[in-house]
Image (spheres, rainbow, N blue to C red):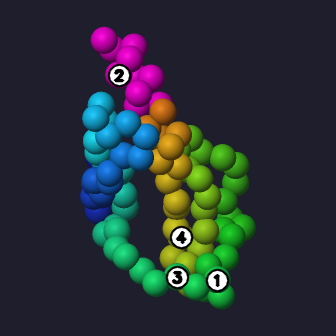
């Protein structure tokens, strides 16, 4: 269990008939934010790649993780295909 975790439900991109939505576990409360290049910088503390993560950034003083939705959807399709 992750303290303060929430599930963000997002519309799938590739195969809306077979996988219309996916849930992404988040920490804190996801919110829409206006972003400009001057407040968005690479997260230099990030070490290495993580599955399902497109990029790690800093937005002001907050760590921001941008999910790789295409990779997540592809992995889910593989799991569902193997389960059938």
What element does badge 1 sit on? helix
Residue 24, position as x, y percentages in the image: 36, 50
What element does badge 2 sit on? helix
Nearer mark to the viewer, of 4 and 1: 1
> Mark 3 sits on what residue?
35
What element does badge 3 sit on? loop
Highlighted range, magenta: 75-84
Looking at the image, residue 39 lies above or below residue 9? below
Tag 1 near tag 2, CB within 8 Å: no
Residue 6, position as x, y percentages in the image: 27, 58
> Mark 1 sits on what residue?
37
Q: In whole angstroms, how far apart are the C-alphas of marks 4 and 1?
A: 15 Å
Tag 3 near tag 2, CB within 8 Å: no
> Mark 4 sits on what residue?
63
Tag 4 near tag 1, CB within 8 Å: no
Residue 60, position as x, y percentages in the image: 56, 84
For the point 32% across and 54% down, the residue is: 10
């Amino acid at each position: 269990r992750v303290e303060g975790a929430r599930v963000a439900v997002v519309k799938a991109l590739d195969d809306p008939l077979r996988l219309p939505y996916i849930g992404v576990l988040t920490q804190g409360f996801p919110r829409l934010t206006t972003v400009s290049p001057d407040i968005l910088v690479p997260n230099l503390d990030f070490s290495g790649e993580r599955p399902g993560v497109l990029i790690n950034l800093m937005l002001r003083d907050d760590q921001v993780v941008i999910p790789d939705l295409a990779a997540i959807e592809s992995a889910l399709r593989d799991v569902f295909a193997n389960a059938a």
